[in-house]
Image: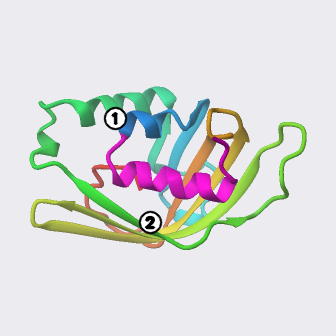
Amino acid sequence: MTLSAEDFVVHEAELIDDRCWDDWLALFAPDGRYWIPLQGAAQADDQTHNALALEDRLLLELRVKRLHSPRAHSQHPASRCQHVLQAPRRLSATPAGGESIRLRTAFLYIESRGPQQVLLAGHCIHTLVPGGPLGWLIHEKRVNLLDAGQPLPAIQLFV
């Protein structure tokens, strides 16, 4: 089944919300990465400033393994989340001959663990490359948080 790039982005968020960690991880290209810049959308690169998260495929695999572990103290009780997305909007033309495509998706993200809830807002920039059983793989997921430069609570899952 091949999805449009826009449907792929929505599917990716649904996998996180449904705690389907292995299926979510399979959406990343071998050289894929997950990046939450410390300065949000204003941050041009990952070399000149720190990041809230900058994880390659290996680090993502370790986080997923931790989420599966019954010994993960931070997951007692287990965290749950819900993404509320605006329709993804293409930032670049449809790929031809293996090019990547970029999409921008505004979101509200709610994470709940026990009686505590975290609400985050921002937008994601997905850079997708052709591949995988759904027609796309994530080369980069950049999460630009609205309040990225402010003190933030611990985020247990994936925005």
Q: Nearer the viewer, residue 107 or 58?
A: 107
- Considering the image in quadrants, where does the N terminus appear? top right
Q: Position of residue 63 (x, y in %)?
A: 34, 35
**Which numbered circle lies on residue 148?**
2
Query: Split into 4 quadrants, where in the image is the C terminus?
Result: bottom left
**Which residue: 35% across, 28% down?**
62
Q: Residue furthest right?
A: 97
Nearer to me, 96 or 60: 96
Between discs 2 and 1, the one toward the N terminus: 1
- How would you rate the neighbour count of disc 1 (Cα within 10 Å): few for under 14, some for 14-19, many for 20 or more? some
Depth-wise, is mark 2 or mark 1 nearer the camera?
1
Numbered tag placed on residue 63 in the rendering: 1
Alpha-carbon span between mark 2 and mark 1: 21 Å
Q: Label 1 amino acid? A: Arg
> Badge 2, how many Cα within 10 Å: few under 14, some, many 20+?
many
Name the element at disc 1: helix
Residue 54 is left or right of residue 22, and the answer is right
Which of the 4 image quarters holds residue 81? Answer: bottom left
Residue at (26% x, 62% y) in the render = 153
- Image quarter for residue 117? bottom left
**Residue appearing at x 76%, y 63% in the figure:** 91
Answer yes or no: is residue 98 visible.
yes
Q: SS at mark 2? A: loop
Q: Specify start and end residues of the magenta stretch as a single range.
A: 1-20
Q: Residue 154, percent across and down?
A: 26, 55
The numbered mark at residue 6 is none
Measuring from the top left, give residue 143's x and y in whole percent: 52, 58
The amino acid type, in three-letter code, at marker 2 is: Ala
